Amino acid sequence: MGDKPSNPTGRDRLARRPNEERTTRKGLAVGEIGPRQEGPHAPGDRRAAILARSAELFATRGVAATTVRHIGEAAGMLSGSLYHHFPSKDAIVAEVLAVFMADIQRRFAEVARRAGTPEETLRRLVHETLAVIEEHPHPTAMYQNDRQYLCDRGLLEPVDSASRAVRSHWMKALEAGIADGTFRGDVPPEVSYRALRDTLWATMHWPNRANFSTEEFADLLVDLFLHGLRRPAG
């Protein structure tokens, strides 16, 4: 996970993007936040819907500014009914972030399981990070924009703990690459890790990000990171 960008915030960008431009990776539009009147749901479906609508509200309004009433209206249910699914707003915040971090950990564990060369592993870690940002824009914005709220409410440590586990995948790939001569050894792996990590998480604010597929963008960043701006000799 990266440091909080200064300008523009993920919240600003999510809030002001035209509705037709706000789509998920699968091309499904993310609509204006408002009540969704839906038919009967199984408890699991209703819980998932609450989490999805809450995450969008948290990202665009801010966690602190979002109330249980806002969530109830967005989910098309009475605010009191939310307590049948979650004991508090903070419980919803915690689960949104837990699902987010669990997906990152699952993806990175799969990369490690299929690990090839250090460069191949690094490339796949970059790809999976960009895929997570693309598929989970709202939890990404929450983590970057609402760290103080999360810290004050005791919600940040579980996320940071999971982030430390994610860090180990990056460090193992970088250290293995230094050991076998793939990566230069005069740059500490911690410096390389932080530079790459923070760049990746900042890309959610880049206006030209949509010009590239995830695979294209991952390849571009890896090549830039490994080979720099200098033209190849010859």
Image: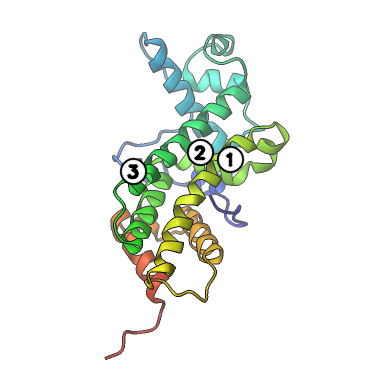
Residue 110's label in the rendered image is 3
**C-alpha distance separating marks 2 and 1:** 16 Å
> In the figure, 109 relative to 44: above or below?
below
Q: Nearer the viewer, mark 2 or mark 1?
A: 1
Q: Is residue 215 left or right of residue 199?
A: left
How crowded pointer 1 is (Cα within 10 Å; few <14, some 14-19, many 20+) is rated as: few
Which of these two is toward me, 180 or 54?
Answer: 180
**C-alpha distance separating marks 1 and 3:** 19 Å
Q: Secondary structure at mark 1?
A: helix
Residue 147's label in the rendered image is none
Which of these two is toward me, 84 or 162?
Answer: 162
Residue 161 image offset from top left, x and y in percent: 58, 40
Q: Secondary structure at mark 2?
A: helix
Which of these two is toward me, 38 or 204?
Answer: 204
Do callouts 3 and 2 mark residues in contact (Cβ within 8 Å)? Answer: no
Residue kind at label 2, given as amino acid type: Pro
Residue kind at label 3, given as amino acid type: Glu
Residue kind at label 1, given as amino acid type: Ser
Q: Is any part of residue 34 visible from this angle?
A: no
Looking at the rendered image, the quarter that the C terminus falls into is bottom left
Q: Is residue 125 left or right of residue 8?
A: left
Do callouts 2 and 1 mark residues in contact (Cβ within 8 Å)? Answer: no
Residue 50 image offset from top left, x and y in percent: 48, 21
Mark 2 / mark 1, whichever is N-terminal: 2
Q: Residue furthest right?
A: 152
Q: Residue furthest bottom?
A: 234
Residue 194 image offset from top left, x and y in percent: 54, 60
Q: Is any part of residue 222 visible from this angle?
A: yes
Residue under pointer 2: 139
Residue 161's label in the rendered image is 1
Residue 35 image offset from top left, x and y in percent: 47, 21
Residue at 46 percent of width and 59 percent of height? 206
